[in-house]
Amino acid sequence: MTARLLAGLAAAALLPAVFAGLPLLHLAPNRLVTGAPIAASDALGTRLWPIAALAAGGLGLLAAGRGRMAAGFAGLACLGALALLLAGLGAGATDLTAGQPFATRARLASGAWTGMVVLACALAFAARRARLPSGGLIAAAAVLALIGGLWRAGRLDALSLVVEGRARSDALGGAIRDHLVLALGALVLAAGVAGGLALWRRGRGAVDLTVSGLQVVPAVALLGSLVAGLSALLTAAPALRGYGISALGIGPALIGVAAYLLLPLWRGLQAARRATGPDNVAAARALGLTSGQILTTLRLPLGAPAVIGGLRVATVQALGLATLGALVGAGGLGTLVFDGMAQFAPDLILLGALPIIALSLAAEGALGRLEAALRRRWPR
């Protein structure tokens, strides 16, 4: 009891300590400089106290409380604190930039990011402890709905990240589209190659060694090698340019990303093959099942979870590695990330990085749920 009480007190003090020790905003004369740190009391004003109280109550109850009801109340408190924090940051940014030159930016600082991450994680944990069906999905939907509602209401318009996003809305939409095309194209290419290699029974050892060895090659070095190789190929055979082949663009990026996806897909296929043991196949044949029936009633059901598991890893990896496609002119969200790095513009970097994180989490969650459902449907 004492340990649980101490844990509750420590959790309750976490966010107030963050607000006391870390700035919530940076006020900068333009988008390229960090600016002056703004403490929580100056950024939030009187809004600080209800936010701190709700956060302390929610985190403390989550750590010290027991049962589904306590978890439910803790989740509601954390969601309320997150809503007030986001609205308060937007209002604080509006107050700080009022009367300032047009280029003035109010940027989220370390305290704001820490507070939002802590509250979002606490909300997800509370939903899980409350044993809600699809608790993580409910928590994610609540956070997204909250952010979307505040954004549509214009409560976040003064924040530098939102200003940057509105200024580059067209470029952002195109970058997301190009990023998905590159990632999904590489995934399809790698899946086709891995599926073909899986049919080569005698060369499995060599294939495993090759696809494992590709993982230790730095991605930038591999992309550079592909650009050099394609340049040499086009020099030797200029007619290939007529078929749309280029040393820069989506071609080398597609091949490079697909090369890294071979390992998880290959391992997933091999795990699926091993899931159906020879004794199971022999028993099925003894019962009179044909090869097609064995495939549909035995091999696919038992191997599907392993295949989806490999696909889950490869999909998340593809969404991350597609960022590097911008280095060879393939576009995508990496363009915003690298432009932001070149301009020393943190908000532009975040504008490219946050959608990548969101897409990766969505893919991980969806495919993870599918894999778990298949394992429940066809337990080994």
Image: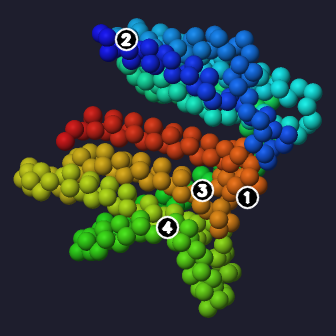
- Residue at 45% across, 38% down: 366
Residue 83 sits in quarter:
top right
Viewer-side label of 1, 2: 2
Residue in front for this viewpoint, 138 or 95: 95
Q: Is residue 7 visible?
A: yes
Residue sitting at the far front:
21
**Residue topped by disc 4:** 218
Viewer-side label of 3, 4: 4
User: What whole-number distance in Å separates the C-alpha atoms at marks 4 and 2?
Assistant: 48 Å
Q: Taking 127 as reference, is 340 left or right?
A: right
Local secondary structure at mark 4: loop
| Image x and y of residue 6, in percent | 38, 15
Q: Which mark is residue 5?
A: 2
For label 4, the crowd category at 10 Å Cα-Cα, with few meaning under 14, some 14 to 19 and many 20 or more, is few
Name the quadrant of the C terminus. Answer: top left
Q: Which mark is residue 342?
A: 1
First in sequence, mark 4 or 2: give its number: 2
First in sequence, mark 1 or 2: give its number: 2
Q: Amino acid at mark 2?
A: Leu
Q: Amino acid at mark 3?
A: Thr
Q: Are marks 4 and 1 in contact (CB under 8 Å)?
A: no
